[in-house]
Image (cartoon, rainbow, N blue to C red):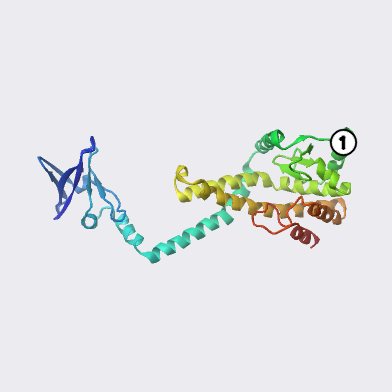
Amino acid sequence: MIKVKGYYFDGRSSNQLAVSITFELSGEVLIEGVDFEINTSIKKLKISPRLANTRRSIFLMGGAKLETEDNLAIDKVQVYFSENIFYTLLHKVEKNLTIVFISLFISIIFIWGGIEYGVPFASKWVVKTVPYQAEKDIGEQGLEALDQWLFSKSTLTEAEQAHWQQQFGQLLAVTEKPYDYRLILKHSKKMGANALALPGGIIVVTDALIELAENDQQVLAVMAHEMGHIEYQHGLRALLQNSMTALFMAGILGDITSISSLSVTLPTLLVEQRYSREFELEADQYAVEVFQQLQINIEQYIRILSVLKQAKQMPDTFDYFSTHPSMDERIEIIQN
């Protein structure tokens, strides 16, 4: 027989009554208080897991419950009647600092491995199942949003724009995938000399980039680089990786509503920048292969990168938070 002191709550009010709880070896349970008595059995009770030395709850049928601070006695009851053995063992494990630190280390490795390898691997395969029309719609919506705050109408003449559309046609002849490619020329004070690729086949080139380039081949090099992003679906993969990383962290840390913005946003930021660096090098490789097919000297690609570097339109220092590898690193890789 195990006797425990505790409190009784009827489930209808916040009043607590001091009671004595007696656990018989037969499994019968007697709850005695002032002017009342309840007879039940261990099978009809639900004992909550132990959390350090906080009050333990014992739930009765009908919504009533008991609370007691005598955790050691309740632990004995659980062991004797084989109730919640897992949680009893878990409590013992939680008190072992060696096991706690080992578990923490394993958790960190698991989270790192999931973000570093699991997320990109999954996104690489998931992106293949996305219908082209959905990818195209994402690109169109992205362009509409950018037009509202980043881009304005190109200042190039109609003849100049027609010339660049014709030049762009050279690249379309060597593409590997049947994308509905579109070259869009835009003016942008905020972006300066730059270009970007949107999912579905949209390539945006700024007037400033065309003005900065020394010849047509250098502009084609940048266009080929952006086509690499589209061919490898980098934009869509970045979107998926962003979302998957946030969901992965939410699943690891618990209910998404209880996660601070930093706990999810920071890993997502780190992963997004790392993948952007990887994507840039992959797009560089694609551009080199396109130039080889068109029999254009690779030095033109290296030259436009150097020009952009001198114009300080791209970062020139190694920075983990940079969205591109350093220009010197890219040039060295292309040369090799």
Q: Quadrant of residue 127?
A: top right
How many C-alpha atoms fall within 10 Å of the one at disc 1: few (<14), some, or many (≥20)?
few
Q: Toward the viewer: 282 or 325?
A: 325
Q: Nearer the viewer, residue 62 or 14?
A: 14
Confirm whether residue 29 shows in the render: no
As drawn, 334 above or below 268 = below
- Against 208, residue 333 (above or below) is below
Query: At which x and y percent is residue 22?
Result: 14, 51
Judged from this view, the residue extending furthest toward the bottom is 98
Q: Residue at x 85, y 49 (%)?
A: 218
Q: Measuring 69% from the left and 41% from the top, which residue is drawn there?
A: 199
Residue 236: x and y, percent?
Answer: 65, 44
**In front: 303, or 99?**
303
Give the x, y percent position of residue 214: 88, 49
Spot the residue most to the left. Answer: 35
Residue identifier under label 1: 162
Dividing the picture into quadrants, the one containing residue 289 is: bottom right
Relative to 264, 133 lies left or right: right
Please identify the quadrant where the N terminus is shown: bottom left
Would residue 205 be found to the left or right of residue 249 on screen? right
Total numbered labels: 1
Task: Give the side of residue 133 with respect to residue 336, left or right.
Answer: left
Element marked by disc 1: helix
Q: Amino acid at mark 1?
A: Ala
Can the viewer see residue 13 in this picture?
A: yes
Q: Position of residue 258 (x, y in %)?
A: 45, 44
Q: Does 275 sit left or right of 20 as displayed?
A: right
**Residue under the point 70% across and 53% down:** 324
Which part of the image, by quadrant, shows the C terminus? bottom right
Residue positioned 62% across, 42% down in the render: 129
